[in-house]
Amino acid sequence: MGQSIPGIPGGGLGGEANPPGLTGAMSCFQGQMAEYPNISIDRFDRENLKARAYFLSHCHKDHMKGLRAPALKRRLECSLKVYLYCSPVTKELLLTSPKYRFWETRIISIEIETPTQISLVDEASGEKEEIVVTLLPAGHCPGSVMFLFQGDQGTVLYTGDFRLAKGEAARMELLHYGGRVKDIQSVYLDTTFCDPKFHQIPSRGECLSGVVELVRSWITRSPYHVVWLNCKAAYGYEYLFTNLSEEFGLQVHVDKLDMFRNMPDILHHLTTDRSTQIHACRHPKAEEYFQWNRLPCGITSRNRIPLHTISIKPSTMWFGERTRKTNVIVRTGESSYRACFSFHSSYSEIKDFLSYICPVNAYPNVIPLGTTMDKVIEILKPLCRSSQSTEPKYKPLGKLKRARTIHLDSEEEEDEHDLFDDPLPVPLRRKVPNQRTLHPKVFQMTAVSQNQPEKLGQSTGCNRAESMQTSLWANFIDCEESNSESEEESQIPASSQGDPCPVTHHQQKVDAEVPQWEVFFKRNDEITDDGLENFPSSTEGGGSQSPKLFTDSDGESTHISSQNSSQSTHISEQGSQGWDSQPDTVLLSFQERNSGDMTSLNKGGYKPRIKENLPASQMEQSVLCLKDSSSEDVTTVPSVGEPTTVSGGKHIPQERRLPALSTNADSQSSSDFEIPSTPEAELPKREHLQYLYEKLAAGESIVLDKRKGSLIDT
DNA sequence: GCGATCAGCT
DNA sequence: CACAGCTGATCGC
């Protein structure tokens, strides 16, 4: 019974703390899900050797354990019907490595957001099980996806590793049916940062803005000023490279780029030519090299003129709910900086995600360092359905206080959205069924854009509220400090409503294609002005602004940062603490910007032109019709003999929650993001709120200019 | 000689 | 500041 018992994924890790001294969060997902034990995901050893089908969410080594082991290789040779399913990009990246070449004929890539039926056949008995899988973008690294499985044992979601801003789940059309979130039995969740201490992590856009400005402040000094991006070996930094490249018109130097040969949108921003001002090359002794002003690729000068180098190390920075610190760039040495960067969702983002999905069960895939399985479960439980029902319905009493409204128009909501709104996944679907005949029956269900009944279940409204409550409640417990904000949120549907009736628009027209990965990563938004406004230019007085984009010496020391708002920007050479000539003034505080979305950068988007080999689904056949008994939104017709009942078993889609309101959920979780966390900010005064409300009531828009500096700097 | 595991170090 | 690795040492086959 190798199956992992829900709740005890590891089979035995329950409740134990990570051994001290460990270096990182510990993965506890063993590869199998309770509902569908015949398939294995992201684990390929032990019990998983018996799987009827394999799934790989993304191309990071810690999710590929056993993938090239002799045992699995043998299994493959004997079981000709066993395949590995993943996104087209993941397939491409995986096969670039010679070590995994043997998988070549056994990988089937599935387009993002294209429900696909797979037959899981037991080669010995001939027993067959049908399952429909849908890949949803996970925002973790190129090709990363979440897997939504629908079959007789219900609908389950395996998130793999993900970084999704709050509200993004609400915008994933295929997580919905009939205007509501699908009835999801279990979620196997990326809980890497599921600990209150990781409450907030600046958004991609905020982090990117910080890096862009720091880089700008340096490389504009002369052609001999170069930056070295000290990235750990892993996929996931590409959006940083592409955005920097685009911003400055300079390709980024890397050691290898053949893995991107079929991904022009990434490839074009990279180079193996060392004569560029932006490097992301690596070397085992890189740090040592750097000390001697040598880049990992070996160069120290150009045209016999020595280079001036700074290093920027992307690393995760987090902020507690009450934390005041806000810098996304921290100076760690005379020529060294850390830049905020995260591939994983923060605590509040995780809570937002889970509370929106509101599954019956949620199982952590990871136990964060320093915590235990039990603690993580305690956090997740209140966000699941069961607890909802038991939850007392609590309706916030007085509303008011900082109105979420504020955010409405000003930042956040906005920009998070752009991720989806603007760049639509450009379709281009090659429906390519290639060689049919593929053993595994894979059928792409034609995704007909549904006519989603937009009914916004009124009723659901309540539920929604409920769930929210819960999460609020959750907040109380987990976050020592949080209380304050909680309640109000509940309401203010306004914002939420506004856009996201998730289901509808943007996202794919289902027929869409491969979503460009940039849909997730290219954050042009803030890059533009706003972020910058404050500081680079703010040379002189930054004072007014709050921004502290960065600080010297890392740390929590808030104080430091502030001081320099004064500093000048890139131009100035003044340094702090003796470290001079280095830009230390570029500070970007993550709450500053008001989203600016700019889509400018999105160009076509990347579509790996990969010669597909989508097997099976012979087009014709591919049109399946699932009994919609399930909660399927996609209309499909099983070509296969049997009317596949791909439903989640429950034929009655239970609808719950009203998507539109969803955003509320975040409110609390993220509330602080915007408001409280703003260090400088003070709570709105009553009069001010009154004023804001009046404007709102009058239908006027409220624009929050980045925090007035006035409040800042204590 | 290879793989798995672990310590150490980014 | 903890993303995801790599390297090297040890042990077993």
Image (cartoon, coloured by chain):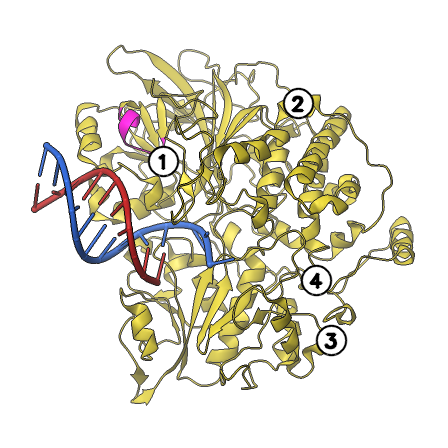
Chain colours: A yellow, B red, C blue
A52 or A707, nearer to the observer: A707
Chain letter of disc 2 in the image: A
The mark found on residue A655 in the picture is 2
* Label 4 chain ID: A
Which one is earlier in the sequence, the residue at label 1 or at label 2?
1
Whole-number angstrom distance, CA of label 4 to CA of label 3 = 14 Å
Q: In this view, does A147 lie to the left or right of A667?
A: left
| Disc on the earlier residue, 2 or 3 | 3
Q: Mark 1 lies on which chain?
A: A
- Are labels 4 and 3 assigned to the same chain? yes
Q: Which callout, 4 or 3, points to the residue nearer the camera? A: 4
Query: Given the image, on which type of amino acid does mark 1 rest?
Result: Asp
Q: Position of residue A224 (x, y in %)?
A: 39, 84
Query: Residue at the spot x=60%, y=60% of the render?
Result: A525
| Amino acid type, label 4 | Pro
Q: For this view, does A590 lie left or right of residue A236?
A: right
**Residue at the spot of label 3:** A544
Q: Distance between the residues labelled 2 and 3?
A: 49 Å
